Image (tube, rainbow, N blue to C red):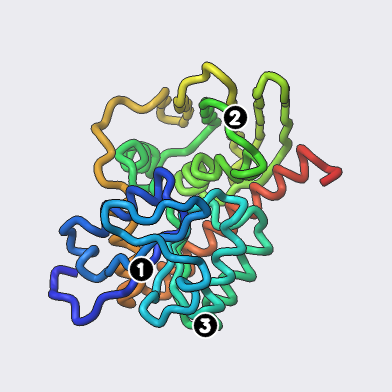
Amino acid sequence: MSAEPERKFGVVVVGVGRAGSVRMRDMRNPHPSSAFLNLIGFVSRRELGNIDGVQQISLEDALSSQEVEVAYICSESSSHEDYIRQFLNAGKHVLVEYPMTLSAAAAQELWELAEQKGKVLHEEHVELLMEEFAFLKKEVVGKDLLKGSLLFTAGPLEEERFGFPAFSGISRLTWLVSLFGELSLVSATLEKRKEEQYMKMTVCLETENKSPLSWIEEKGPGLKRNRYLSFHFKSGSLENVPNVGVNKNIFLKDQNIFVQKLLGQFSEKELAAEKKRILHCLGLAEEIQKYCCPEK
């Protein structure tokens, strides 16, 4: 990627919250992958005019513009599916923040649409680019898991905007699947106290070797954003991750991966493995939701 680009891909960013703002900053800074991208504008439901000299454009203009070849979807999760479909149908490549959809069937359908259109569809997973994950990956390799647990706590999150907790928390599920392989659902419960903005989802999973894994998402006022984990192996235990350094430029690292895909630098095997993992996690999230809310 160090070579001087022969061409630049015109990009529009949809949604300018935290992720969208970081994406715009990374594209405008002199990084090797940014040299292949040309930030044309951003789309927002709010009337913002411009941000640091980047022009706001309408969704219609972004979809119809020949100049726009790539869309970064950084809006709230409930809107992802619709935006992805519109941009793929308009012949654009798509990068989307996780979760790409709030149903596994929709994700499968969108992937088929991307393949039909010959476009890249990339779901961001910055949690796999974190120093903590790199540490865990090294720690668990070659070890036999006996049992494990992962608890995530944070402040309240609006389900209407960000999806059921198994979807809004899919990065934790992705960690477990990436560390221990495909998982199956044993049971799941959801405790909710709406007036207190409190929720606790408890999921019991098992590995292909029948080792139990529990995943808990707990959110409410006063709860600090934190991750607690405990993995017990035949050869010892791992309780939480030591301080392994600051996560630097994780969105930029994700952009590098996306640009490599645009340039055709990923093998079919790598792309197929990634797609399989993403669809497996979305399928599990949907199964958990149905288990917790059978009436929906």
> Horizontal and vertical percent for residue 254?
34, 55
Tell me, yes or no, whether the two marked residues, 2 and 3, touch with CB atoms within 8 Å.
Answer: no
Q: Are marks 1 and 2 in contact (CB under 8 Å)?
A: no
Which picture quadrant has residue 9? bottom left
**Residue at the location (51% across, 64% down)?**
275
The residue labelled by disc 3 is: 117
Residue closest to the eye, 167 or 209: 167
In the image, 183 versus 263, the foreground residue is 263
N-term mark: 1 or 2: 1
How far separated are the C-alphas under marks 2 and 3? Answer: 39 Å
Q: Is there any visible trace of residue 98 in the rendered image?
A: no
Q: Position of residue 211 (x, y in %)?
A: 59, 37
| Residue 24: % across, % down | 31, 55
**Rendered-image quadrant of the N terminus:** bottom left
Residue type indicated by callout 2: Ile
Q: Is residue 5 left or right of residue 55?
A: left
- The amino acid pointed to by label 1 is Val
Disc nearest the viewer among 2 and 3? 3
Relative to 125, is 189 above or below?
above
- Alpha carbon separation for disc pair 3 and 1: 18 Å
Residue picked out by circle 2 = 216
Mark whose residue sits in front, 3 or 1: 1
Callout 3: 10 Å neighbours few (<14), some, many (20+)?
some
> What residue do we see at 37% from left, 37% from top?
136
Q: Nearer the viewer, residue 61 or 210?
A: 61
